[in-house]
Amino acid sequence: DLLANKIAAGEVVERPASVVKELVENALDAGATEIDIELQQGGLELIRISDNGSGIEPNDVPTAFERHATSKIRDDKDLFRIATLGFRGEALPSISAVSRVEIKTRTEDSAAGTFLRIEGGKVLDTGVTAAKKGTELIVRDLFFNTPARLKYLKSIQTELGHTTDYIERMALARPDVAFRFFHNDRMLVQTSGDGKLLHAVAAVYGREIVKQMVAVEWQNYDYRITGLTGYPELNRANRSHCTFFVNGRYIRSYQLFNAVQAAYHTRLPINRYPVCVLHLELDPSLVDVNVHPTKLEVRFSEEKDVFASMQAAIQSALQTETF
Ligand code: ADP
Ligand code: MG
């Protein structure tokens, strides 16, 4: 029902960046290899996401906006997965409860696409339309019917910053996906999707920085660490930019950052800071992802091993570095 949707929306949708996150995750779930994200006024006025993923079957379009109606929930195992990963089938119902949404979608097999317009959780119009394969979602006037929420949004610049951070992380996490990110018709991020981390890092941090980075490629029995690291002369914002992914998921870890810094030891010139993008892969049973409600933090069962491995990985990359 509408009220339940509106209340639950508060848990899923905090700000434009959380809408972008949910919609980009849906596009990735649908197997998209090209994702365009467009914001107007930091996303307060408009958020548009289009993808070249599987699209949605005509009959499934209205269902996708109904709470817990998602096909992903089939049995107890799915419920467990939902509880742990947050796949709850709530994003579209929640977002559409607090905004004006338009969806246009077409699957490979359908001759025509489907559109649906829904405002504050009420379907206004639906029908057949021309559409390319994939899905386009437009979210306008976020929180138009929840003034209390609207009041808590920050400035356009701050809201834009949250989305930009998220898009940059996704671009680094998924070099195999071509992202384009526009704000007020200006393109802020563009990646090629060719699968090369080097190219994704160049797109996010700039070509000059990449030239001053070295590849990290290290593994032992338990851990595999890959990516790029450096302490470039040209450092955007003149501070540290270290991004860590654990089994493909972005995490925040002060300790991993310390391990990187420890590896640089005395090599770091004054006023220079490490910039790195590192993927750590390990057996999922060795990492607890449910420590923090927003799931940006994790706990490793063998913490000392992980940090020692990170330090060793960076040190070995630095040894092969040619000056
Ligand atoms: P969940 O992702 O947890 O299943 P959502 O509310 O985010 O729930 O999406 C509901 C359903 O709508 C998804 O399960 C999926 O079937 C469909 N869907 C949403 N976005 C897309 C998309 N971009 N491409 C294809 N299907 C989508
Ligand atoms: Mg989803």
Image (tube, rainbow, N blue to C red):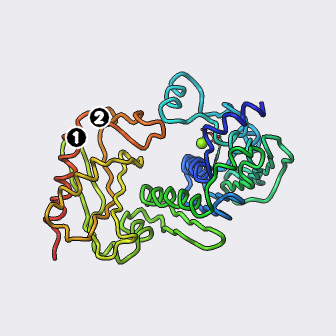
Which residue is found at the position 59% from the left and 34% from the top? 88
**Residue 90: x, y in percent?**
64, 37
From what the image shows, is residue 181 above or below residue 22? Answer: below
**Residue 52: x, y in percent?**
61, 58
Direction from residue 197 to residue 80 in the image, left or right: right
**Residue 315: x, y in percent?**
16, 59
Per the model, the C-alpha gap separating discs 1 and 2 is 9 Å
Which residue is found at the position 39% from the left and 66% from the top? 201
In front of the other: 296 or 90: 296
From what the image shows, is residue 74 above or below residue 203? Answer: above
Direction from residue 114 to residue 193 in the image, left or right: left
Nearest to viewer (mark 1 / mark 2): 2
**Residue 189: x, y in percent?**
52, 68
Instruction: Please give the residue where the numbered disc 2 appears in the rendered image.
Output: 286
Direction from residue 52 to residue 64 in the image, left or right: right
Direction from residue 23 to residue 269 in the image, left or right: left
Q: Residues within 10 Å of mark 2 (few under 14, many from 20)?
A: some
Is mark 1 in CB contact (under 8 Å) with mark 2? yes
Which residue is found at the position 47% from the left and 64% from the top? 193
Identity, as a three-letter code, of the amino acid under mark 1: Asp
Secondary element under disc 1, as helix, strand or loop, is loop
Quadrant for the C terminus in the image: bottom left
Secondary element under disc 2, as helix, strand or loop, is helix
In front of the other: 316 or 95: 95
From what the image shows, is residue 240 above or below residue 6? Answer: below
Instruction: Tell me which corner region of the image, top left, top right, bottom left or bottom right, holds residue 130.
Output: bottom right
Identity, as a three-letter code, of the amino acid under mark 2: Leu
Lower position in the chain sequence, tag 1 or tag 2: 1
Instruction: Please give the residue where the numbered disc 1 appears in the rendered image.
Output: 222
Q: Residues within 10 Å of mark 1 (few under 14, many from 20)?
A: few
